[in-house]
Amino acid sequence: EYCYEVSAVYSLCGESDPSNEDCVVFEGSNLTVVAINPNEQTVSTNETFTTTVEIADVNNLGSFELELSYDPDYIQASSVTLEDFLGSTGRTVFPMVNTINNTSGLIEFAVTTMGATPPGADGDGILLTVEWVAAASVDDEVNTDILIQNLQVTEPDGTVIPTSSEDGTVIISPCYSRDFDCDCDVDIVDITM
């Protein structure tokens, strides 16, 4: 519940009293949610890891486009894979854009389906899988975000589906002192390196 007051100045001294108070109750959201999963994960330096871009509570999914923004000083994208959810009802899928720019820290992805039938996918599913590599070294633990930007989701006929997005965070932990292979274990392998 969110309550607010609208006040009006009524005296020469500048004092005011509430002239109107109202409260609004927000009942759940009808928004489709697109999220980075996991929303937070910890990795070691130079570790390869994956995140997925997932969609929840969608009806009649026909296409989507988005950008993933990240700090290329800390993580680099190595691949982006379109998963099966978009075409899961038998619709023909046409990837349009799939670019990775590790200089600016931006992934651009757009894909659509064609035809009036069958209907688009409903429910929850994985849209994309992204493989990343963490920075080769960090002095201290680093938190870096993966941000969903310029998101658009539509039905097969182009009707925009209202969406919200949930970003992700990657925590990069430095290697232990003398852990030369960064496997979080100082052992005989480190001595031979």
Image (cartoon, rainbow, N blue to C red):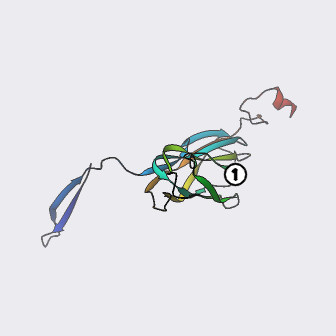
Please give the residue where the numbered disc 1 appears in the rendered image.
76
Residue at 47% of width from left, 52% of height from top?
A: 60
* Furthest residue in direction bottom, as rendered: 12
* Furthest residue in direction top, as rendered: 188
Residue at 30% of width from left, 50% of height from top?
A: 26
The number of callouts visible is 1
Question: Which part of the image, by quadrant, shows the C terminus?
Answer: top right
Residue at 84% of width from left, 30% of height from top?
A: 191
Q: Which amino acid type is marked by label 1?
A: Gln
The part of the image, by quadrant, that contains residue 174 is top right
- At label 1, counting other C-alpha atoms closer than 10 Å, the crowd grade (few under 14, some 14-19, many 20 or more) is many
Left or right placement of residue 185 versus residue 119 in this view: right
* Furthest residue in direction front, as rendered: 117
Up-down relation of residue 91 to residue 184 (above or below): below
- Specify whether residue 179 is in view: yes
Residue at 45% of width from left, 53% of height from top?
A: 164
Residue 52, percent from left and from top: 59, 45
Q: Nearer the viewer, residue 65 or 111?
A: 111
Residue 192, percent from left and from top: 87, 31
- Specify whether residue 138 is in view: no
Query: Dot 1: what SS?
Result: strand
Left or right placement of residue 59 versus residue 73 in this view: left
Residue 54, percent from left and from top: 54, 46
Up-down relation of residue 56 to residue 20 (above or below): above
Q: Nearer the viewer, residue 7 or 106?
A: 106
* Furthest residue in direction right, as rendered: 192
Q: Nearer the viewer, residue 165 or 71?
A: 165
Left or right placement of residue 123 versus residue 52 in this view: left
Residue 4, percent from left and from top: 24, 57
The part of the image, by quadrant, that contains residue 148 is bottom right
